[in-house]
Image (tube, grey):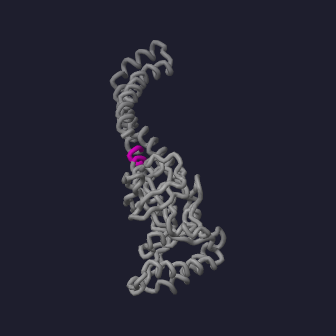
Amino acid sequence: FSIATFFIIGSVIVYQQISYLTAKDLGFKGDKVISVALSFPDSEYEVANVGQNIYNKYTRIKQELNKIKGVEQASTGLISFDGSDNSLGAVMYKETLFKERTIAVDYGMLEMMSIKVIKGRGLEQKYAADTISSVLINEAAQNLMQMKDPIGQEVTIRNRKLNIVGVVKDFNLLSPEVDVPPMVFYHLKTMDIAQNMSTVYVKLKSDNIENTMADIEKLWLSVDKENPFQYDFVDKQYARTYESYVKQKNLFSLLNVVVIGIALFGLFALASYSIQSRMKEIAIRKTLGAQTNVLLKELSKQYILFCITGFLVALFPVYYLLNK
């Protein structure tokens, strides 16, 4: 009974945890956004100003994407939503070095993912400084660096002094049970690292998605002739970060059925054995006029006591192990 109780309560808690993960506000929305793999021929990476060259080519692709009827917006960034990138970089603030995620993005990337700027402003094309000396930080970075008023503060990344122009609301990039890391965002051209770009993000409109995907694929085949067209929806990418927990839930459910079945068979066997061993007592009581419901209560007492005792015994390991 204790083991059965452990698995019953355990499966309920695991189910609630998975439901929490799937319903949790992640801080971004990727249900209509696809990530499309992008690469150029090796010759494009062998020119003198490779970063600017790749950025120019990407800009032309973005312009073509925006012409497609079913495309709402296109952008890019050195950012992934599949939980695979947990790298940290050095950010200096007031002579103190901090480990934070440093992420290069293009204009509109954060807005496209519905990532909110809660203080200051985002990166905008109308400000020339936003490709030279502007950065955004998230709430976790603000707390880590103990900034009361971060707007206008100066941080140093790769020996470049950059001014904070906005604060972004925390959002998950890793699996949802992991704390949101401190993050710093700057434009791709600020550090001239567009050559590291490998993905373009495209937000689709709700209508005629199949036709839109066909048009995007047609464009991609003219851009990247060496590699097949590959894409994935961002929300599905992120869902894979907690896929193992979903499998655990399914395993717990299966074990639950088995354990409850074993417990019921055990209870039936105990009851049968008890009735057989007390057959004479039952016959005598019945002969003396005992009612059936009274006899059933008398026989059930010990099993109810077993169940309650089993439940109480299971409470501590359930509480301790499932908190772990």
| Residue 16, magenta (yes or no) | no
Instruction: Depth check: give the residue in front, 58 or 10.
Output: 58
Asked if residue 74 is positioned above or below residue 113 in the image, the reply reads: below
137 lies left or right of 259 = right
Asked whether residue 166 appears in the rendered view, the answer is yes
Asked whether residue 34 appears in the rendered view, the answer is no
Q: Position of residue 72 (x, y in %)?
A: 63, 70
From this viewpoint, which residue is outermost toward the top? 288
- Residue range corresponding to the magenta coloring: 252-256
* Residue in the picture at 39% in, 62% down: 85
- State which quarter of the image contains the N terminus: top left
Q: Position of residue 97 (x, y in %)?
A: 36, 54
The secondary structure that most of the magenta stretch takes on is: helix
Asked if residue 97 is positioned above or below residue 160 in the image, the reply reads: above
Asked if residue 324 is positioned above or below residue 172 in the image, the reply reads: above
Instruction: Depth check: give the residue in front, 91 or 13.
Output: 91
Asked if residue 219 is positioned above or below residue 321 in the image, the reply reads: below
Q: Position of residue 304 (x, y in %)?
A: 42, 25
* Residue in the picture at 44% in, 70% down: 191
Instruction: Depth check: give the residue in front, 73 or 163.
Output: 163
* Residue in the picture at 40% in, 35% down: 5
The total number of labels drawn is 0
Q: Position of residue 154 (x, y in %)?
A: 47, 56
* Residue in the picture at 40% in, 48% down: 254
